[in-house]
Every structure is written in structure tokens, then in C-alpha cells.
Image (spheres, rainbow, N blue to C red):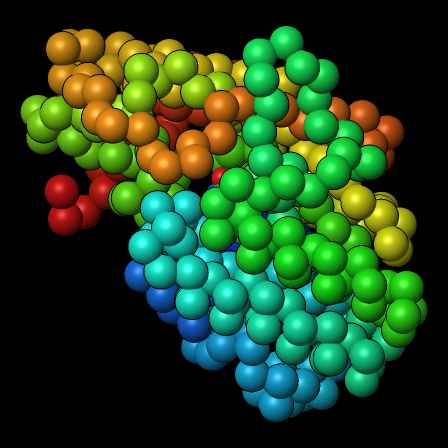
Amino acid sequence: MNILVTGGAGFIGSHFVLRHVEKHPEDTVVVLDSLTYAADKSFLDPVLNRIRFIQGDIAGFELVTTLIDRYDIEAIVNFAAETHVDRSIKNAVPFMHSNILGVHALIEVCKRSPKILLVHISTDEVYGDLQDGEPPFNERSELRPSSPYAATKAAGDLLLKAAIRTFGIRVRITRCTNNYGPHQDKTKLLPVIILNALQGKKIPIYGQGKQKRDWLYVTDHTDAVEFILQKGEDGGLYLISGDNERENIVVAKTVLKTLGKPESLIAFVPDRPGHDWRYSLDNRSMKKLGWKPTMKFEEGVARTVDWYTKKKGL
Ligand SMILES: NC(=O)c1ccc[n+]([C@@H]2O[C@H](COP(=O)([O-])OP(=O)(O)OC[C@H]3O[C@@H](n4cnc5c(N)ncnc54)[C@H](O)[C@@H]3O)[C@@H](O)[C@H]2O)c1
């Protein structure tokens, strides 16, 4: 298969590219990434001579169609997005560009070449949050985004839903819970905890750290995307989660224990405006496809800590 991976130099996209090239050496893999602050092209170094890398914007219809034609692309896997909730609260404009106009451009590309399959990576955050004891969100749950980030992701999902019906394009949408692992930008929760702890700095935790997230190791997520690419149905919506809900404070303490650092480094800071309380997804659609998470949380945290500890420039 000839595939275009957008956002392939970011956290999750880079793991997808590395694993896809290893598992499917016969495929042509083209990576398109605009290289924002969250990207690091060097993540792709191990496979750089086996892929084509292009720096550019998914919202650029002409660039994307040129790549589609040049490499005879059969599927697009779209990881490209602005993703940091705190940044979206400060300025939502880049989020509207990548997460809405970017998706719109990909829809136009698929209208022009209707054989192309678009696997679009969305997020559980489009549903807003749950209170303790409420059942997990499912495919029929209402979209109630809380942050500008989540609102732009929900807008992208709705544009795709409309395009499936109006234009008959081939789309599969995924929504995943929180990921952790190597390659994540240093301003996200786990890297902040690890990097501050390594430097003996205070670790800021919003509120009392009681918010719950369902944590999934990044390669379990990319393996789920691979299942959906290979075995999913067009028009399908796939909810991916790790059956691994933990409070943020528990996550921080697990990292500190792994590093042998004291819990006294934790410093509670005023809560994020509109902060979601709890995320949880019903992942039965993924289990039906034959996927299940494989990484134990403590092992995944140990691998993540190891990667950041060895990373150059610390
Ligand atoms: N990180 C998580 O916990 C998580 C959970 C669920 C879903 N997701 C979704 O997974 C996808 C990838 O997330 P991530 O954590 O790897 O994000 P990331 O911020 O680490 O990487 C995003 C990548 O997209 C690129 N990019 C941004 N705008 C672009 C544009 N207009 N054109 C081309 N490239 C562009 C960036 O340069 C970067 O390499 C996103 O759609 C996100 O909503 C993430």
C-alpha cells in the first residue's frame, strides 16, 4: 500500500511511521509534517532512507494533491493537529487552521480522488468529561467539547461525518484516550513530571490532581490505528482506550517512584479553566477487530522515564 502519514514527525505519528515501516517494508510511506514546536524530525532517523519526508501543511490542497499523484497514494492516516489544550486556551487560531481547515483540505483531496481511504485520528476529548461512576462514552454519545482544542477536533469530526454522507468519501475516524510514551512534547503532563523530577524541580499538578484519565501506551494506540487501517470499515467510528483509568496524582506518584524521587516535589497549582474531570471510552468496537492493549502501565512508565532520561540535551 502507498500511504501518506500526516503529522508523522509528532508524538504518536512518529511511532506509527516507525512501526509501519518495520511491519510493511513493501509499502511506500510518505510523511507530510509542517514541523511545529511539537515535531522532531529526528524521531524518523531510523527509517529516513526508507520513507519520503516532506515539510508542509495539510491545509495546502495543492501540495497534498501533488503528493497523492506523485506517489499514487491509496490511504492517508491523519495525525496532523494542534494538540495542547493550554495553548488552545491562549490562542485557538492555529487549532482552527490545522484541526478544521486542515481536515477540510483533506476532504477536498478525497473528493478529487474517491478511492483514497482517510483514517482520521481524533480524540476522546470531543465528548467532554464524565463524573465518577458514569458509564464510559460510546459511539452514540453526544459531542460536548470543553476546550478550544476539543471544539476544533469535534468540528473536524463533524465535517468528516457530513462528507461521508454528502460526498461518499472513504473515512474511518478514531477517538483515543490519553497517550503516554517516548517522543511526546516536553510541555505535556508525563514529560513535565519526568523532566522536572530529574532536575529536582517542583512538579505542577492542576487542582488536587484528582482528575482521571485512561492512559494508553503510545504503541498500543498506533497498533490500534494499524488494525483500523487494515481491517476497519469505511464510515466506521472506533473508540480506543486502555482500560487503565488513573488519577493524575497517581500518575505523578508512579513516575516519582520509578525515578526514586520524593513525592514532596509535587506542587498543586490553580486548576485549568474548564478542566475536564474524567475521560473513559467503551472500546468494544476495537476488541471486535481483534485489538487489545498490551503494555502494563508501570512497564510503560518505566520505558518512558528511561527514554527521557537518556534523551540528549537534558
Ligand atoms: N497525545 C494524546 O494523548 C492523544 C490522545 C488522543 C488523540 N490524539 C490525537 O492524535 C493526533 C496526534 O497527536 P500527538 O499527541 O501526536 O500530537 P503532536 O502535537 O505531538 O503532533 C502533531 C504533529 O502534527 C504536525 N502538524 C500540526 N499541524 C499541522 C499541519 N497543519 N500540517 C502538517 N502537520 C501539522 C506537528 O508538526 C506535529 O508533528 C492528534 O490528532 C490528536 O488530537 C492525541
Q: Residue furthest left?
A: 200
Residue at 79 percent across and 54 percent down: it is 172
**Residue 279 falls in which quadrant of the image?**
top right
Percent x, y of residue 59: 56, 77
Drawn side of residue 233 relative to residue 304, left or right: right
Residue nearest the viewer, comparing 158 with 218: 158
* Res 71 visible: no
Residue at 51 percent across and 66 percent down: it is 96
Percent x, y of residue 230: 80, 50
Residue at 22 percent across and 20 percent down: it is 268
Percent x, y of residue 140: 82, 36
Drawn side of residue 193 relative to residue 22, left or right: left
Which quadrant, please, contains the N terminus?
bottom right
Which quadrant, please, contains the C terminus?
top left
Determine whether 293 is above or below 117 in the image. above
Drawn side of residue 194 relative to residue 74, left or right: left
Residue nearest the viewer, comparing 142 with 189: 142
* Res 13 visible: yes
Q: How many marks?
A: 0
Percent x, y of residue 138: 77, 30
Drawn side of residue 22 relative to residue 172, left or right: left
Determine whether 290 is above or below 111 in the image. above
Residue nearest the viewer, comparing 88 with 312: 88
Residue at 89 percent across and 73 percent down: it is 167
